[in-house]
Image: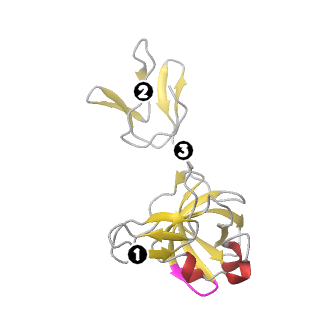
Amino acid sequence: MTSETLLPGQPLALPLGPFPSLGAGLYVKDGRVRASLVGVPRYEGPTLTISRVRPHPPTTNSVILGVVTRLSPLQATVAISVVDGLPLPAGEELNGVIRSQDVRATEKDKVRIGECFRGGDVVKGTVISLGDARSYYITTARNNLGVIFATSEAGATMEPVSWQAMRCPRTGRIEKRKCAKPENL
């Protein structure tokens, strides 16, 4: 059995041996044990259970995922929906801000927010400060941080071609973005 977080409906691989008694957070469907809660399965005596994992508010150095909701010449506003790999409950998104000086580590004075992000882009970032009462300050100034998902003007999912550009597979048009380096490269 693995110690990875399961999502509702996701099947659980059981070790060989006797079938465990199922506790809270698990059910059987189509002969497979499945999770009914987001959480990590564990044994409590002979009973296998999943206890509910509660998302926590971001702290400094928390990795977040969010959607760009608004752009201005100095900053991009982000609706944070995932903190440290745990999704926030629906309707409880948090606000974050990526300031122009926090987009990349070099040439900070040459950054143009409109050339790095667009509304609707999904961004991976790190919290650098708890900010003010309204929002968290986020940085994308590392290679693995930036836009991870974007839709082109033609409505297609874009593919990264460099750290600062994405291509529409439908039209072949290049659009500027601050791209995150994919995890497996």
- Disc 2 residue crowd, few under 14, some 14–19, many 20+, Cα 10 Å: few
Of 173 and 145, which appears nearest the observer? 173
Residue 78 horizontal/vertical position (percent): 55, 72
For mark 2, give the secondary structure. Answer: loop
Residue 5 horizontal/vertical position (percent): 51, 40
The tag on residue 13 is 2
Check disc 3 and report the residue beneath it: 53
Q: Amino acid at mark 1?
A: Arg
Mark 2 / mark 3, whichever is N-terminal: 2
Mark 2 / mark 1, whichever is N-terminal: 2
Color style of the picture? secondary structure
Question: Looking at the rendering, which quadrant does residue 36 occupy?
Answer: top left
Residue 100, compared with residue 182, is above or below; it is below
> Is the C-beta separation of discs 1 and 3 under 8 Å?
no
Question: Looking at the rendering, which quadrant does residue 177 occupy?
Answer: bottom right
Q: Amino acid at mark 3?
A: Val
Mark in the foreground, 2 or 1: 1
Mark in the foreground, 2 or 3: 2
